[in-house]
């Protein structure tokens, strides 16, 4: 039987994997209202993805949410005949994932550095 730490980790992982695409989907719904162009829409989805990546504690959750974020953008947000192709904008979502993960790592490192100086 797994210990409490293993069960807690699985609960956190499931919570983050469910909450991440939900946040990105909410940003996907908001982006056509806020911006008519694909570039503006990808910025909204990328900001949601950055926040989500900074919030997630598990690396597995951060990486597993990146693909649904790109697919939500390409298939839902930017998939309209009047707009140009959406695929060239998807690296922005990957960059947002790395930016959020980097922020999380730096914040974690500074927290440990402060704890060591006390």
Image (spheres, grey):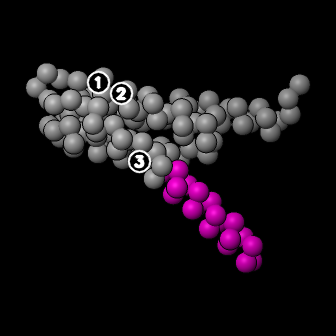
The quadrant in which the N terminus is found is top right
Quick check: marks 3 and 1 in contact, CB under 8 Å?
no
Name the element at disc 1: helix
Where residue 34 sits in the image (x, y, percent)? Answer: 19, 41
Magenta residues span 100-118
The label on residue 95 is: 3
For label 2, the residue is 72
Give the quadrant of residue 38: top left
Image vertical order of residue 118 relative to residue 74, above or below: below
For label 1, the residue is 76
Q: Residues within 10 Å of mark 1 (few under 14, many from 20)?
A: some
**Residue at horizontal 67 percent and vertical 72 percent from the top:** 114
Nearest to viewer (mark 2 / mark 3): 3
Name the one closer to the observer, 72 or 26. Answer: 72
Where residue 43 sits in the image (x, y, percent)? Answer: 29, 45
- Left or right? Give the position of 9 relative to 26: right
How far apart are the two marked residues, 2 and 3, measured between alpha carbons? 16 Å
Quick check: marks 1 and 2 in contact, CB under 8 Å?
yes
Res 5 seen here: yes
- Left or right? Give the position of 27 relative to 86: right
The secondary structure that dominates the magenta segment is helix
């Amino acid at each position: 039987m797994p210990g409490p730490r293993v069960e807690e980790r699985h609960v956190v992982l499931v919570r983050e994997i469910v909450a991440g695409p939900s946040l990105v989907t909410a940003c996907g719904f908001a982006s056509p209202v806020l911006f008519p162009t694909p570039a503006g829409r990808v910025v909204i989805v990328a900001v949601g993805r950055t926040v989500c990546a900074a919030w997630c504690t598990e690396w597995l959750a951060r990486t597993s949410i990146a693909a649904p974020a790109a697919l939500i953008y390409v298939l839902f947000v930017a998939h309209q005949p009047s707009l140009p192709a959406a695929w060239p904008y998807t690296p922005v979502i990957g960059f947002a994932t790395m930016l959020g993960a980097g922020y999380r790592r730096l914040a974690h490192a500074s927290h440990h550095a402060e704890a060591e100086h006390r």
